[in-house]
Amino acid sequence: MDVDPVSLPPDEGTVGDPVWADDGPIGAHHDTRELAARFEDEKPGRVLSGPVGLLFTGVTVAIALLALWQVFFPLPQGSKYYLIFFLAGVLPMVFLAYPSGVRLPRRSASAPAADDAADAGGSPDGPAERRGPTPVDWLLALAALVSCLYPVLPVTIGAGGGGYDAFLDRQGLLDPLDVAMGTALLLLLLEACRRTTGWILPAVCLLFLAYGYYGGLLPQSWPVAHAGLDFGQLVDAFYNSDSGFYGTPLDVAASYIVLFTIYGAVLDLSGAGRFFVELSAAAFRRSRTAPGRTAVASGFLLGTVSGSGAATTVSIGAVTWPILRRAGYPPERAGGMLAAAGVGAILSPPTLGAAAFIIAEYLGVSYLQVLGWATVPTILYYLGILLSVEIDARRSGVRPVVIATGSAWRLLARFGYHFLSLIVIIVVLATGASATRAVVVATVLAAALSFLDRRHRLTPARLVEALSGGVRGVLAVSAVCAAAGIITATTTKTGLGPQAAALLVSGAQAVSSEPAVVLALTALLAAVALTLLGLAVPVTASFVIGWVIIGPALLNLGVTAPAAAMFVFYFAVLSEVSPPTALAAVAAAAVTGGRLVPTMWQTLRYALPAYLIPIAFVITPTGLGLLGIGGPERIAVAAVVSAVGVTLLAVAAGGWLPGIGPAGVPERIVGALAGLSLLWLEPVPVTIGALLAVVLVAGVFVRRRTAGRAGASPAVPSGTPGEEIQ
C-alpha cells in the first residue's frame, strides 16, 4: 500500500501559519482568525489602528490590570463596585471595536460610496471591519461610559447622583434621573449585543422585558401570569440590584473569563498552540489512523488556548485537513470529525466554557469541583470520537499517511514546559485557592516560560498584545452577560422560573404518572428545549436562560443541583453542533469545502455521546457516578458501563465492530438498543443491554464467517483452507 509522506508547515508563529498553499482554502494565520470569527457566537470586529488603536490598546490593558489587581487587592466597596468600573471600560470599547452593520437606504445614486461608508461606519476605502469608528459609534461609547459610571458619580444632580452609597440607598425608590440612566444603559446593552451576536438575543431580552411589564394583563388563571411591574420597578431590578446588569453572569465575566482569556492569549503567543498540534501529530504518526487521531488530540489540547468550539475547529482544520484529505477522508466526514473535536474544547478540563464558571458561582462550589464533574463525561466524549475515527478508517479504506514530524519524546523534552501552566492551575486549585488566583499564577508562569523559546518570548510589546487581546476576547461575552441580567432579574421578580418548571413537569405527567417515566420525559423535553434555545442565542446566555427556566423543573423532580447544572451546561454547549445552525459544523465545512448538511450529520454522529451522557446522569442515581459523585464503586460502575454503551453506539453509527469486522443493519439496530439500554444505569436495563451486546457480537462473527466462506475461491484444492476476508 502506498504511503504519502506529509510534513507539517514550518512555524513562524502559532497554529494557522501557511499550510500547503495548494492544499485547501486556509492560508495565512490572519485568514484563519478571520474565518474563525465568522462562525463564532460573535461577529467579526474592526481592525483598529492609528490613534484609535492606541486608545483601544490602552483602555483594554488598563481593564486587564484592573482585573488582575482585583484578584489580590479587591476594592473595599465590594464586587458590584468593581463591576461598575469593569463594564464602564468594556462597553464603550464594544462600540469602537464592532461596527453597527446597519445599511441605510441610499439618498441618491450619485453618492453610493459615501452612503455606504456612513451606513457601515467609516470611510469608503474598504469593508466595515477595516474602517474606524463613526461619529455615532463615538457618541454611543460616550453614552455608555456616562451611564455605566453614573452610580458612582460623586456629584449630586437634583435628587440623583451623589455617589455609590447614595445610589444604593435609593434601591426600590429610584429617582427619575436614575431611571433615565438605567434605561440608557439597557438600550446600550441591547445594541452592544446586537452588534456582537446579532438580533436574536436582544429580541429575547425584549421579550422578557415585555413579559415583566405586560404580564399583569394576562388572565390570572394562566400559570405564567403575575401581578405586573411598572417600568421603574424593572429598571430598578436591572440597574440597582444584584440580579440585574451587575449580577452573577457579569461577575463571572469580569472575575473569571477575562483572566482565562488573558491566559489563553499568553499561551497562544508563547507558541503552545503550535506545540500541541505538532505533539498530536508526532504521537500518532506511525498509526493507521494518524490523521484522525491527530485532529482529535489537537482539538482537545487547543481547547486550553481558545476555549471556543468554532475557533478550535478552524485552527485544527487549517493544519490537519490537508492530511485528512490525502488519507482519503471525504470532506463531509472530515468536517464532522473536526467540528466534534473542536466543540470538545468547551467540554474539556481544565478550561471549560464560560458557563462552567457561572455554575461554580450559582452553586457556590469551587471551580475545581466543576472540573471534577466534567472529567468522566469528557473521557466518554473523546472515547466516542476516537472509536468513530477507528471505525471510519477501517470501513472507508483510509490510506496510511506518514506525518513527517520529529519524535514525540523529543518534542516533549524541548517544549513540554507548555503543560506546566496547565498543571499549575489544577495544583493551585487543589490547595484551596480560588480559580482567579490559580489562573493568574499560571499566566505568570506561562509568560516566564516563553523565554525558553526565542521565537515566542513575551517581550513587553508582546505582553501588551496578550493583555489587550485577552480583554478584547471578552468584550462580546461581557455584553452578553450584562444583558443576561435582564432575563435573570425579570425571572426573579415575576416568579417565571417555578411557573415554567411546573408547566414542563405537568407536560410530562400528562403522559404518565410513573415517577421514573416523568423524570425521563422531563429530561427529554428539557434537552429539546435547551437545544432549540441554543440555536438562537450564545452558549452563555443559553445556559443562564436554561438554568432559571428549566433548572427548577429538574430540581423539583429530585435531580441534584450538580446534575441539573451540568445537564443544562452540556446542552447549551451542544448548540454549536446541532442543526440547523451548528456553528462548528459550518466552520468545518468552510475549511474542508464539504457540503453543509452532510457535514452537520457527520458531526452529530461523532458527538453522539455528548447528547446521551447528560441524560444518563440525570435519570438515575447511579448516573451521578459519571459526575464523580458517590463512592468509588458507583463511579467505576457508571464509567465502565457507560463506556461500553458509548462503544456500542459508535459501532451502531459506524457499522463496524473493531477487531472483528463489518456490522449489518440488524446488528447495528441491536447495537443501538444495547447502547441506549446500558446508558440507563439501572440493573434491569443494564442486563438487557449486556444481552443485546452479546447478540451483536455473535451476529458480527456470523456475518464475518459467512463472508469468508462466500469469498473463498472455488478452485482451492481439497484440503487447502480458503483465506477469510477481513
Image (tube, rainbow, N blue to C red):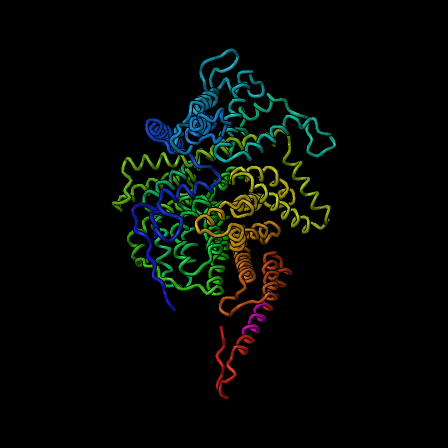
Residue extending farthest bottom:
718
Task: Identify the residue at image location x=38%, y=46%.
Answer: 422
Q: Magenta stretch containing residue 703, yes or no?
A: yes
Point 61% across, 63% down: residue: 669
Report the quarter where the N terminus lies: bottom left
Establish if 594 lies above or below 219: below
- Among all residues in the image, which is located at the extreme top? 158
Q: Position of residue 132 (x, y in %)?
A: 39, 28
Q: Is residue 231 shown to the viewer in this render?
A: yes
Does the image show residue 251? no
Q: Nearer the viewer, residue 525 or 561?
A: 525
Would residue 500 be found to the left or right of residue 704 on screen? Answer: right
Seen at 26% across and 43% down, the residue is 451
Q: Is residue 599 left or right of residue 412?
A: right
Predominant SS of the magenta segment: helix
Task: Judge from the rendering whether residue 12 lies leftward or rightward of residue 110; answer left or right.
Answer: left
Question: Magenta span covers which residues?
Answer: 696-704
Q: Nearer the viewer, residue 38 or 221?
A: 38
Counting from the top left corner in percent of width and height, residue 434 is at 43, 39
Question: Residue lying furthest right in this view?
Answer: 221
Q: Is residue 638 magenta?
A: no
Q: Image quarter for residue 221?
A: top right
**Residue 307 appears in which quarter of the rendering?**
top left
